[in-house]
Amino acid sequence: MFSFMIRRLGHGVVLILIVTAITFFLTYGAGIPVATNILGKNATPEAIAKLEAQLGLDLPMGQQYLNWLINAVQGDLGRSYFSNEPVVDAMATRLPVTLSIVFVAAALMLILSTILGVASAARPGILDNILQFISVITFIFPTLILGLGMVFLFAVSLKWVPAVGYTDLSDSPTRWFAGVILPAIVLAIGGIAALAAQIRGSMIDELEKDYIRTLRSRGVPERSLLLKHALRNAASPAFTTFSLQFIGMFGAALFAEKIFALPGYGTYGYQATVTGDLPALLGASLFGILIVVVVNLLVDLANGWLNPKARLT
Amino acid sequence: MTVPERQATLDANHVEERRKGSFARMLRNPLGLGALVLLTAVVMLGLLEPVLSAHDPNFSSLTAVNTPPFSPDYLLGADQYGRDIWSRSLVAINVSVISGLLGAGVAVSIGTVFGLISGYVAKRTDAALSWLFNLVMTFPALILVMILYPITGGDYKIMMGVFGIFISAGIFRLVRNLVLGVRNELYVDAARVAGLSNVRILSRHVLYAVRGPIIIASAFLAVASIGIQAGLAFLGLGSSQLPSFGLMAGAAFLNIYQHPIQMLWPSLFLAVMTGALVMLANAYRDSLAAPNAVPKKPRTHTVVPPIEETGATDSAASIDGNQDQARSKGNLLTVRNLRVEYPQADGTYRSVVKGVSLDVNLGEVVGVVGESGSGKTQTAFSILGLLPRQARVSADLLEIAGEPISAQDDRTLRRMRGSALAYIPQEPMSNLDPSFTVGSQLIEPLTAGMSKKEARATILALLARVGIPDPLRTFKSYPHQISGGMAQRVLIAGAVSSRPKLLIADEPTTALDVTVQAEILDLLRDLQGEFGMGVLLVTHNFGVVADLCNRVVVMKDGEMVESGDVRSIFHAPSKEYTQQLIAAILDENTTRSDPPAAAPSALNKEHAR
């Protein structure tokens, strides 16, 4: 297990290097006139050359990437070209916002889809049809439309929750929750049906397996067969699907942030990409891939805990 | 055309026929037809944009600002800049359609090509490609598209192409796994023997088999692409001059408190398009699955209550021949006219057990013998109440340990399992839960009646009794850490742990090595004597019957061929089929190679041997 985790960590580091390198060479290589953008169109060529030298933009590309990497390892991701705010600081204030909505959404998704999936596997029929119906509905309304609809219904028409804004968890947990719950629901809904379908499918597979029949022959109650034995064995593929959903939500959080005007990671990355703020963009993609690596690692750990066979390798 | 190639083509044609059939079936489904009509209508609106458009979609008219819908000249109204929503919607339809086609098209092309290669070539190519696509899959496509925005320059077509690449991993995995499955199927082998080139095999035969799921997946990918394109445009990533639903939604969102109706139109168009696509895909999936669909009848163990006891036993006695006519007191198991049926695709029922009657007395070992598909395992499972949900069971009489098992009463059987009734399965490894230690799954049923500590001591003693050298170690092991022979001993220990009166053993030695087989049979014989159990032993091997049983029931095609005392049947079989089974003992020097007869698959394995 230990060597397995080490291997996965190594895999993660390689992934981080590849993604940041690709981002770096594509964005820095795109020929965006950074200095001109910063100084304005009327800047003199001398001023532009001076700024480029200052930012290190006149160095060879490989050299620039290496410099960035060396600084990054030391915890320095540079400063935004425009706000001059250190990228690390910006991430520290913005990631909690995005992670708040993504974690609440993930919790919602995990709980609801497990209940739906297990129930519809145990009792095919009405529940199964409801699940199918929900899956069609959630597909019909993309995250975007769903989000807009929710804002309209709960914030504009019913005025139950504030339409926009984020309160830090440490300031007021209730206001934090009020601000986070709508975007979280918007994010979760798309994944619930897919994850529930996955859980339903693997539960049905497990329930048809020989060991369930044998345990049943020994008088093990149906409840235990379903919730202890079948669910435990069905959990592993479900976790893999869940990790993909989680990563997907991290991307889709961008829409939710925009709709609910949350100052999150996605919005930051979005502004960086529109303005051509390269250090900010690179920092955002680094944290994106970091989160992907961490989530995958956690899922591997969970699967190792669930599956005794994986524990040995 | 060589014979194998013709066979391969025939199979491919068969798939093709089914596909056409499924398309027609999809159209007969009102949901599928409705979705197709709706989708076609919307696409047509987009195509007829030059004709239907009333205004320049980007022209701002100061007099038209926030015109309400259904005004003359402005069918859907105008937005806060005075632009005609109807004209803008028509252009936006085209943008959405192209986005869907591009995203899904790129993803399907890349995923299919590499999936086919990976699944078909396998080995290192597969490992490398799988690694690559897994990598692509673990990164949020949306964030990548956003990062690449400065390079794509905001052209939605390029962005959708990039998005297509990043979502191709799903298709890749789908195709690869399907190809891996299809790869070893007969018709591909046949085609390969016939000397067809790899490319031809891939494109003609394998692709035919996997196209159904690909078509379904493309619909969902198109939905995702349309959604993402709208999302990106909503965020403002893209041209502000090109009307799209995302852009329209973005403009309307700013106006949501004053004129919420403007929000409706882009949402409605998007929902109709994606909804129609999803419903179309679902209808197509249903139509693909239809030939194998099983009508749902969640009836479990339905046993018809005994009609007239005397009449029932009479009819049974006539089959049972010279056997003890009436059921004597102390009979452990009495079965009269047992029938098991399974629903077929066409709604009819197919019998797999056709009127079996048998008795097991206290301390007696009764063999049920027959080849695969003879219904012997189905008979055993129906007594245990362990048949799959869709099975229909009926009997004139089913009595276990003096208790009648009546209709719609699963509770009696449930109580008996784990007390009076026990079961030893055929395949040891698959009958242990891989996620729990051997000990914990053996203890679980016992803890209802005793403390955990007692249960643990009982199980450890039993594990020693069934001949496991280091009981504590096995107790703490996971199933994959013990051998097949050990696993079968564990299962036997589990079966006798409840001190059952009747033990039903389904081919208990078939999956084991020949040397282990004899040991297990000896163990069974010893335990039977020790506990004084009645045993119903299901086997295909007359040798095992001769070794262990007092009486035997011979089955073929779900019917009883003959039954009686083992010795008399062994020495003077009255039916030719029994003679063949006895003659087959001599051939029985290897373990049986066909898989254990699990309930539904048993139906298809009739002629496996």
Image: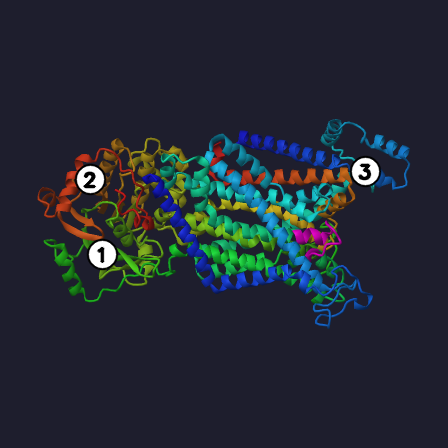
Q: The magenta stretch spans which residues? A: B229-246
Q: Residues within 10 Å of mark 2 (few under 14, many from 20)?
A: many
Residue B70 picture quarter? bottom right
Query: Does A109 sit above or below residue A152?
Result: above
Residue A94 picture quarter? top right
> How far is disc 1 from disc 2 in space, using C-alphas?
25 Å
Query: Does A305 sit above or below residue A131?
Result: above
Residue ID for mark 2: B544
Specify whether B52 is left or right of B402: right
Q: Which mark is residue B311?
A: none
Q: Residues within 10 Å of mark 3 (few under 14, many from 20)?
A: few
Residue ID for mark 1: B354
| Secondary element type, mark 1 | strand
Specify whether A4 is left or right of A104: left
Specify whether B61 is left or right of B47: right
Q: Decide whether residue B236 is among the magenta residues.
A: yes
Coordinates of residue B293 in the picture (x, y in percent): 39, 56
Q: Decide whether residue A291 is among the magenta residues.
A: no
Of the 4 image quadrants, the one containing the N terminus of chain B is top left
| Secondary element type, mark 3 | loop
* Residue nearest the viewer, comparing A68 with B488: A68
Q: Residue flagged by tag 3: what amino acid is it?
A: Pro
Residue ID for mark 3: A33
Q: Chain of mark 2?
A: B
Q: Chain of mark 3?
A: A
Identified at 70% across, 69% down, the residue is B75
- Looking at the picture, do discs 2 and 3 lie on one chain? no
